[in-house]
Amino acid sequence: MIKNALLAVLALVLTGCLVMVDSDSRALQTVWSEGDVSRLQKGQSDEQFVRDTFGEPTSRLTHADGREVWKYRNRSEKDTEVGVFLVFSVDVEEERIETLSIEFVDGVVSNYWIDEQRF
């Protein structure tokens, strides 16, 4: 019984040494950070504050009722490699796009949200 338990522990330890996981993330385009977003105040921040903080938007949408939505995008890439020593290796690449949308009514921030897409 003890011999079987020792063999099982030895197998687990050796298996742990044989499996490798390596992950690397890098920013491709960064326009805004969580710190910048936390400074937005609904009903107080105006278009000039947003322009000074985030720059010119990637796109603008104007609605018939006068609301305007400015969009800012961050792009990043994550590369993950999983391998079993000397047997096989799998490399997975993932691109992530985060879009910050800021809605204005009469030149003042009325709402904002972040959408995330993974490819």
Image (spheres, grey):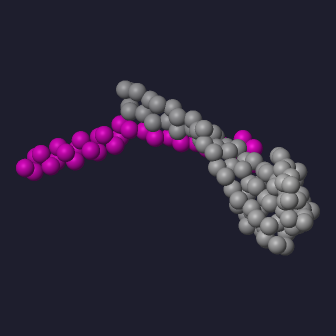
- Which quadrant, please, contains the C terminus? top right
Question: At which x and y percent is residue 25?
Answer: 61, 44
Q: State the count of labels.
A: 0
Furthest-left residue in this view: 1
Residue at figure coordinates x 85%, y 49% from the top left: 60
Furthest-right residue in this view: 48
Residue at figure coordinates x 16%, y 48% from the top left: 6
Furthest-front residue in this view: 64
Magenta extent: 1-30
Q: Is residue 55 left or right of residue 95?
A: right
The front one of 100 and 74 is: 100
The front one of 18 and 63 is: 63
Question: At which x and y percent is residue 101?
Answer: 76, 55
Is residue 49 something that shows in the picture? no
Q: Is residue 7 magenta?
A: yes
Residue at figure coordinates x 46%, y 31% from the top left: 90
Furthest-top residue in this view: 87
Is residue 44 something that shows in the picture? yes
Residue at figure coordinates x 80%, y 67% from the top left: 110
Question: At which x and y percent is residue 71?
Answer: 79, 51
Q: Quadrant of residue 29?
A: top right
